[in-house]
Amino acid sequence: MSAARNIRLLGWFNFWADFRPYAPIAILYFSEVSGSYALGMSVFSATMLAQSLFEVPTGVLSDRVGRKQTVVYGAVAGVFALTFYAIGGTYLALITGAIFEGLGRAFYSGNNEALLHDTLAESGQREAYQEFLGKTSSMFQLALGISSIIGSLIAAISFQVVLWLSVVPMVLALLVSLRLVEPKVHTGHVGNIYAHLTTAFRNIVRNPRLRLLSAASVLSYAIGEASWLFRSAFIETLWPVWAIGVAQTIGNLTAALGFYFAGRIIRRFGEFRLLIGGMSLSELVNLIGLLVPTVLSPALMASNSIFYGVNSVAINGLIQREFTDEQRATMGSLNSFAGSLVFAVFSFLLGALADRIGVIPALVTAALLSLIPMMLYWKALGGRATVRPEIAVGEPQI
């Protein structure tokens, strides 16, 4: 009963936590307040720097005091973050919001996947992790898709109203988090935090496959996420502000489909084919849309987000198999720590590059850099395709 309840609640928590009407115009709003693309992107950098600072402590906290309580702490931080963004007006208010958002992300990263994994382990469905992760994660994208349309339409009237509207769903996410059930398979323990952290780090360093997967996922996340957040600046050159949310919605809804069906797609084709083939095709489409910019480019580039959903689940599943149960959240937080640092640097550099040479050349550069994580995945997976066996799993009720 607790497993079914947690899966359902995690789905709804994901939905409300990412129901963010401001998302399509975030870079436009931040740049307007701060005065440049570089400073606008630096708000995202500040979020990730804050997340990296809090990553490891929150990961250890999750392993020690429990998954549910950690989600609640993250939701509280999220409410503060959106409130400061809405107050806006000054760069300082944006940075304060970014710090709280980074704290909230740190509470979630590693922890929420560990909560799902522990919930499934308790009910004897550990092998169904990718299936359920895909379905619960699809709610992120569904929320972003719906809220993007709402946000972009209201943004044509007022950015400020959009930001205040974004606070409400985060409050609802907090209320959902209070109803989660702590998995019995996980019990908090009191021990030496330094030893716990050292063990988690050692487990990553001594596992060659995990090292490669972690490095690839870190680079893929930093390059891909920064490019996605900055893409609105490109779309604005082709479409009016009110239509930006349409492109975002196409991307989010196709990503939601990718997440939802990821489990069965992965079992059919295997992680290698999906990661290498999907990433290659996705970046090719991006390059075509950027190098031959037309009114159709934003929709074309958004449509390949289906690969994002499938590949995110594939990557997470591969990494989770290499983690140990005792340090699962802490090891996940160490990976997120690295991803946050790299994103913080790359996103600022992407904005600065756009200020210097233009939006399109900056995004083309990011697309070409995506070849690096693809090569790392190739090496980690042995350069060969495998077809995963069918696993009978139940359908999560979300």
Image: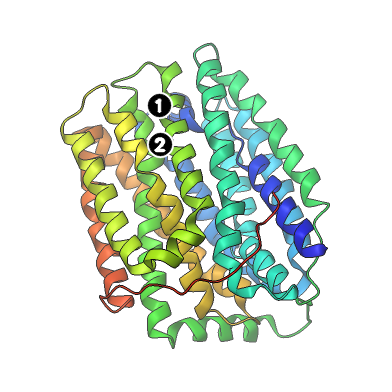
Judging depth in this view, the residue of 237 and 395 nearest the camera is 395
- At horizontal 40% and vertical 26% (from top left) the residue drawn is 35
Q: Is residue 338 visible?
A: no
Q: Is residue 44 left or right of residue 381?
A: right
- Disc 1 packing (10 Å; few <14; some 14–19; many ≥20): few
Q: How many marks?
A: 2
Identified at 66% across, 25% down, the residue is 165
Residue 151 placement, left or right of 27: right
Quarter of the figure with the N terminus: bottom right
Quadrant housing residue 395: bottom right
The x and y percentages for residue 142 are 56, 39
**Amino acid type shown at disc 2:** Leu
Amino acid at circle 1: Gly
Q: Is residue 255 above or below residue 87?
A: below
Residue placed at 22% from the left, 24% from the top?
294
Q: Which residue is mark 1?
A: 35
Q: Position of residue 328 (x, y in %)?
A: 61, 75
Horizontal side of residue 346 vs 55, given as left or right? left
Residue under label 2? 39
Front residue of 368/158: it is 368
* Residue 109 picture location, percent across and down: 59, 60
Q: Position of residue 196 (x, y in %)?
A: 64, 83
**Vertical side of 358 occupied by 324: above or below:** below
Q: Are marks 2 and 1 in contact (CB under 8 Å)?
A: yes
Residue lying farthest to the left in this orientation: 292
Which residue appears at 63% of the width and 46% of the height? Answer: 100
Residue 92 in the figure: left or right of residue 285 = right
How far apart in space, not on screen, are marks 2 and 1 (Cα)? 7 Å
